[in-house]
Amino acid sequence: MIYIPITCKITVIGLSPLSVALLAAVVTGTSAAILAWRERPEAGATWLTVLLVGQVWWTTFLVFELEAPTVAAKSLWYDVQWLGVVVIPVGWLLFALEYTGRERYVTPGFVAALFVTPVVTIALVAAGDPWGLIVADREVASTAVGSFLRVDTGPWYYVIAGYTYLLGLFGSFPILQLIRDDARSFRGQSAALLVGTAAPWASSLLHLTGAFPVAGLDPTPLAFAVSGVAYLLALSRFRLLTLAPAPRRRARQLVFEHLHDPAFVIGTEGYVIDLNQSAADTFGIDRRAAVGEPVDAVVPRYGDISVEESDRSPLSIVGTNGRHPYDITVRSISDGHDRPTGEVVVFHDVGEYLGQQQRLDVLNRVFRHDVRTETNLIHGYADLLREDPTDEHALTVVKKSASRILDLSERTRTASELFDPMAKSAPPVALDALVGEVTAALRTEYPDANVSVEGDVPAVRVPAVLRVVAESLCSNAVRHNDSEPPSVWLSAVTDEGWVELSVADDGPGIDDAEREVLKRGTETPLEHGSGLGLWIVKWGVDQVGGSVSFAEREPRGTVVAVSVPIGGDEGAAGGRNAGR
C-alpha cells in the first residue's frame, strides 16, 4: 500500500530512479546541515556545515544534469557541481581539526592555503576549461538508470582527486585517535564520522578504477545518502557538536600551560620536548631555545632527580625569584601500547609549607618551653615576695621574666603577621632608606650602643621583609652583647642581581649548636634556639628566596650576612647558576 503511491508520484514527476535516489541523499544531507548550522559556535559546526552543503550542492546539480535534455544543459549542470566537489575535502579537514581540539591550526593563512587548489579548479571551470585540463571530451550516455554526461578526464582532474584523498586522509587521523577513547560517546561519534566519510571515498575509488557497474557514472553523490544518515546519527544520537572532545583537549593543554608548578616534558633520549610557562618564568629559561636541548642543560639539578622518589629530599634551587626548596615529581609517559615515550618532571615549591612547619615547631617550643620556664620562675619568686615584699632581687627577676614573656609575645605577633599567607605582599623598599630607618630606631632604643654604617649603601630596591630581618639582627647584636658599650656595624653590597646586607657586632658570638639548628631547620627537645630572633631572620630570608650565613669577626664578635634578590625598578630579581 505504500509502494503504489510512491510509484505513481515518481511517474507523475517524471524523475529517473537514479534522480529519486539522489534526492534522498539531498534530504538527509540538508537535514544534517541544518542541525550542524544550529550548533554554531560549537567547535567544528561551521566547517561541518560547509562539508554537508558541498555534498548537497553536488548531489542537487547532479539531479539537474540527469534530467537535462541536451548536452549543453548537462554540461552546464556538470560544471556547476564542481563548486560542491572542491569544498568538501577542505570542510572535512578543517572540521576534523576544530572538532578534535586542534583549532590552533585553523588560521586564516592555513585556510587560504587549503583553498588555493579549489579556487584554481573553479577558475578553470568558469573560463570554460579551454585547455581541457579537467575535461577533455564530453558525451551523453543513456543507461537504464538515467541519462548522464560521460567525460574524458584531463590531468587536473586527477590533481583534484589526489588533493581530495590527501585532505580526507589527514582529516581522518585525528578522528581515528578517538576510536579507542575511554568515553563511549567519543567512540560513537568517531565511528559515525568515519563511516560518513568512508562511503564517498569507496564510491569515488570505484568510479576512478572503473569498477562501478554503470561505466562513466560517478556514484559518489549516491554515497552521500549514507553520509547524511551517519552524520545525522552522530549529531542526534551521539551529540556530535554539543559533546565534542575539543574542550577536553584544550583544557588539558591549559592545565599544563597554566600549571602553577614548573613542569618539563622529557623524551626517552634525554632531550627536552616541552616546558610550561611557569618553568620558563621560574628558572629564567627561553622556551623556544630550550626545546630540543639536552635535559641536563635545561632542567635544574636534573642529575639529583634520579634518586628514588621515596628517598629524595627537597632540592634547593636558585631561580629568578631567589632560592627555594622544591619537591620533584617524575611521572613516566606511555603510548597506547604501554611503551615508554618520555616523562613529565614537575617542581613543587615547598618553601611555604616547610616554613609553616618550622614556625609551628618553633612557636610550639616557645609556648611549651620558654614561656613555661619564665612562668615557673615568676611563680617561684612570687612566693619569695610573699614572704618578704622588700626583696629587691626577687622583684627584679620577676620584672625581667615578665619582660621576656612580653618580648616573646611581640616577636610571636610579628612572625604571625609577617608570614601570614593571606596577607598582601608589601612593595619593595629603597635599601638606603631602610638602613637609615633601622639604625635610627636602634640608636633610639639603645642610646649607649655604637651603631655605624660602613661604606655607601647601594641605591637599589629590596623586598620589604628585609626591614624586619635587619631590625631583628641589629636588636640581637645589641641585646646579646656583653661589651661596654656594645658596637654594631652595617654594610651592604650588590652582586649580579643580589644584595648582601651584613650586620657585625663585637659580642660573644652565636653558639654553634644554635647555628646548626637554623641550618637543619628543625628543633628537638634537646637542641633548639634560644629565642625567636634568628628564626625570624631565617623565615624572612627564606620567604624571598635568599640565604643567610654566619662568620666569626676578629678579634671578637659575629658577622651575619643576609643575601636577597634585588627587587623594584633598579634591578630585576635574578638567580645564580650555582643553584643548578
Image (cartoon, rainbow, N blue to C red):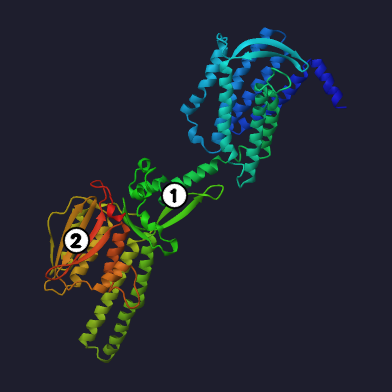
Local SS, label 1: loop
Viewer-closest of 233 and 137: 137
Residue 7 in sight: yes
**In this rendering, does residue 41 appear at all?**
no
Q: Which mark is residue 259?
A: 1
For label 2, the SS is strand
- The image quadrant of residue 211 is top right
Viewer-nearest residue: 394 or 386:
394
On screen, residue 234 versus residue 432, left or right, reads right
In percent of width and height, residue 208 lies at: 65, 22
Q: Residue at x 54, y 44 (%)?
A: 248
Q: Quadrant of the C terminus?
A: bottom left
Nearest to N terminus: mark 2 or mark 1:
1
Q: Residue furthest bottom?
A: 387
Q: Looking at the image, how many numbered discs can be counted on the residues?
A: 2
Q: Position of residue 152 (x, y in %)?
A: 63, 13
Q: Is residue 74 above or below residue 493?
A: above
As displayed, is residue 521 above or below residue 287?
Answer: below
Mark 2 to mark 1 CA distance (whole Å): 37 Å
| Residue bearing mark 2 | 502
Residue 49 in the image: above or below residue 429: above
Disc 2 marks a residue whose amino acid type is Ser
Image side of residue 558 versus residue 148, left or right: left
Disc 1 packing (10 Å; few <14; some 14–19; many ≥20): some
Q: Position of residue 537 (x, y in %)?
A: 27, 64
Q: For the residue marked with disc 1, what is the amino acid?
A: Leu
Residue 389: image location, x then y, percent? 24, 88
Q: Is residue 361 left or right of residue 457?
A: right
Residue at the spot x=42%, y=64% of the render?
311
